[in-house]
């Protein structure tokens, strides 16, 4: 009788644990795939990934030696990549697109629709480049740290822009 109870206990435990193991394996595969895309982008531009971050189906990397920013984002079947040279950038800033929503006749709530980093170039003839970190239409319905991530990377990039580094010395 005790053997039967132990076997049932083990089977129940496995039924509870196996889905988490499978989810973790799939997450690691997805992250490796996204990192490989960023690494290939770096190779194509004769640079390295250096410091990088992966979230959702997106990644960003910064190589301080060659002064490049690498960005990759996959939305369904569309793959977006950007490679930016730090010396061409004047500054970066986080752009948060919001809207007001009234729920049950209560006070309006602010909802974030997009989180982006916008790059202004030193050459004013070049149009701004926008890197999308979050879009409520294509990503999850709620943010999962993308706003903090965008602010972190915008600050990091601003600190690494050559003209800003000279001013801080």
Image (tube, rainbow, N blue to C red):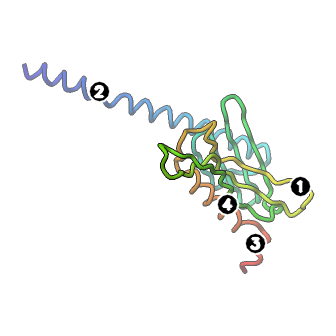
The residue under label 2 is: 14
Judged from this view, the residue extending furthest toward the front is 105
The residue under label 1 is: 126
Q: Mark 4 near mark 1, Cβ–Cβ under 8 Å?
A: no
Q: Mark 1 near mark 3, Cβ–Cβ under 8 Å?
A: no
Q: Mark 1 near mark 2, Cβ–Cβ under 8 Å?
A: no
| Element class at badge 3 | helix
At x 69%, y 68%, the residue is 159
Residue depth check, mark 1 versus mark 2: number of the one nearer the observer: 1
Position of 154 relative to 4 (above/below)? below
| Element class at badge 4 | helix
Q: CA distance from mark 1 to mark 2?
A: 57 Å
Reading the chain from its start, which is encountered first: label 3 or label 4? Answer: 4
Residue depth check, mark 4 versus mark 2: number of the one nearer the observer: 4
Give percent across and percent down for residue 8: 19, 21
Q: Mark 3 near mark 2, Cβ–Cβ under 8 Å?
A: no
């Amino acid at each position: 009788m005790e053997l039967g109870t132990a076997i049932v206990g083990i089977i129940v435990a496995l039924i509870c644990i196996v889905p988490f193991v499978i989810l973790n394996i799939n997450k690691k595969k997805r992250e490796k795939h996204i990192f490989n895309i960023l690494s290939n982008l770096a190779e194509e531009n004769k640079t390295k990934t250096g410091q990088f971050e992966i979230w959702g189906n997106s990644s960003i990397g910064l190589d301080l030696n060659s002064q490049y920013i690498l960005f990759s984002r996959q939305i369904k079947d569309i793959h977006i990549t950007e490679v930016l040279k730090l010396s061409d950038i004047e500054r970066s800033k986080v752009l948060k697109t919001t809207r007001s929503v009234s729920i049950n006749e209560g006070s309006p709530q602010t909802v974030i629709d997009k989180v982006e980093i916008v790059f202004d170039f030193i050459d004013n003839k070049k149009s701004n480049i926008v890197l999308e970190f979050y879009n409520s239409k294509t990503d999850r319905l709620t943010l999962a740290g993308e706003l903090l991530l965008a602010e972190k990377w915008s600050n990091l990039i601003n600190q690494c822009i050559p003209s800003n580094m000279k001013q801080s010395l």
